[in-house]
Image: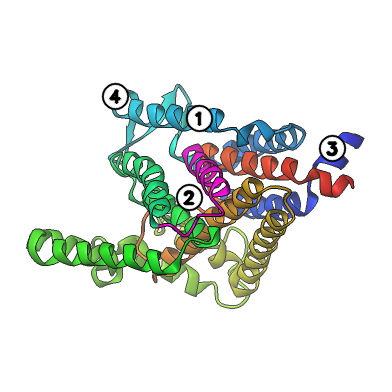
């Protein structure tokens, strides 16, 4: 193996992420029929791993420059705006650019851009970070991107972006008193909308969204089938390729939104716990890299990345087990799809590059 790869790559990031991706591949390969999820995902994973190695070998210090980040942020806003005119519509959402057989979802790299811009903003204001104006300004940065994603419509993506903002606000050291004030205003606004603005049919839709299992033959069908799949795996699982809920297509979108449930059905509690251990190893390594970084910007970037992956995993697993609303959130490194896979591996490569001086030393 080339010496340069040995120096640049953080193998404690690479190995658990690769094993999580392989768990997704094994689950996809268990399905028969005319779908080619496994083959396509092998190609995307191969490309993504190459991107990771290349990103690990590159010097990304220029990303901390304000002009670069502002340009990147404005370019992201422009690309998201272009979706409304040139985007491909699928399942009612205009979230992709389609290039023949290739599709790109800009909201995935947009999440990394949000992390970068917030990391820069908070790293430059660590002395006066407790002032409430920094909550407002940082929220505007995230809210613009979140609003454009929400209008696609992609509610889950918007929730993720706002969740990343909230998490980075917490770890940046902003005054909890000011944060509580903002949270109180948000709660009051929701209460006013519920009591005086929303119509009865709108309240009914929201109630079904929050409690999907209350309508298992309608809006809650997907969540209901997912909980059956998770529970039917029991301790040791049904075995690879023997998941009836997923293989017989009772469980929709098994390769993306419900890959966790499909995996749990086949591998059971033991396999699921092993998967979660891999996830924990990856998140702890990301946090450790952030803790040992040489600058506030790199530290906040690493923490933001751990928050992004953590929220994705928490929401995805929660909606697969019927305890959270179904919002179309993928499982990082595991769910089918090229855009999110490339973005996740690229972000890991950037983090690996930022911390290579500690490994070389």
Q: Position of residue 2 (x, y in %)?
A: 90, 34
* Mark in the foreground, 1 or 4: 1
Where 82 sits versus 270, above or below?
above
**Front position in the image: 341 or 269:** 341
Q: Is residue 30 visible?
A: no
- Mark 2 = which residue? 256
Q: Secondary structure at mark 3?
A: helix
Do the residues under discs 1 and 4 have CB atoms within 8 angstroms? no
Of the two numbered discs 2 and 3 in the rendering, the one whose residue sits closer to the viewer: 3
Cα separation, mark 1 vs mark 4, equals 21 Å
Q: Which mark is residue 72?
A: 1
Tag 4 or tag 1, which sits nearer the N-term?
Answer: 1
Would you call the spot at circle 2 few (<14 residues within 10 Å), some (14-19), or many (20 or more)? many
Q: Residue at x 70, y 34 (%)?
A: 55
Residue drawn at x 83%, y 49% is: 358
- Our reading of the magenta stretch's main secondary structure is helix
Eye-nearest disc, 4 or 2:
4
Q: Secondary structure at mark 2?
A: loop
């Amino acid at each position: 193996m080339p010496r340069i790869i040995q120096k640049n790559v953080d193998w404690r990031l690479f190995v658990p992420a690769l094993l999580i991706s392989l768990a997704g591949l094994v689950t996809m390969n268990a399905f028969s029929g005319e779908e080619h999820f496994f083959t396509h995902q092998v190609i995307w994973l191969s490309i993504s791993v190459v991107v990771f190695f290349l990103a690990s070998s590159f010097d990304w210090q220029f990303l901390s420059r304000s002009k670069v980040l502002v340009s990147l942020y404005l370019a992201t806003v422009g690309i998201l705006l272009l979706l409304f005119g040139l985007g491909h519509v699928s399942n009612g959402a205009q979230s992709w650019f389609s290039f023949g057989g290739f599709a790109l979802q800009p909201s995935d790299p947009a999440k990394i851009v949000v992390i970068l811009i917030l990391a820069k903003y908070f790293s430059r204001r660590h002395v006066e970070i407790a002032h409430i104006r920094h909550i407002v300004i940082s929220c505007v940065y995230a809210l613009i991107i979140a609003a454009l994603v929400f209008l696609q419509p992609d509610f889950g993506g918007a929730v993720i972006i706002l969740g990343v903002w909230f998490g980075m606000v917490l770890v940046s050291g902003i005054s909890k008193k000011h944060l509580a004030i903002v949270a109180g205003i948000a709660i009051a606004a929701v209460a006013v909308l519920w009591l005086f603005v929303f119509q009865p049919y709108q309240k009914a839709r929201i109630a079904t969204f929050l409690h999907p299992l209350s309508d298992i033959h309608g809006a809650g069908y997907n969540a209901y089938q997912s909980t059956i799949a998770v529970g039917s795996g029991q301790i040791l699982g049904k075995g690879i390729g023997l998941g009836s809920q997923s293989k017989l297509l009772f469980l929709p979108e098994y390769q993306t939104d419900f890959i966790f449930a499909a995996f749990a059905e086949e591998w059971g509690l033991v396999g699921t716990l092993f998967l979660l251990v891999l996830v924990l190893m990856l998140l702890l390594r990301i946090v450790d890299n952030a803790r040992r970084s040489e600058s506030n910007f790199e530290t906040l970037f690493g923490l933001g990345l751990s928050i992004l992956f953590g929220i994705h995993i928490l929401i995805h697993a929660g909606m697969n087990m019927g305890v959270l609303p179904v919002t179309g959130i993928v499982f990082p490194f595991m769910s089918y799809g090229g855009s999110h896979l490339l973005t996740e591996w690229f972000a890991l490569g950037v983090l690996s590059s930022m911390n290579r001086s500690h490994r070389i030393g």
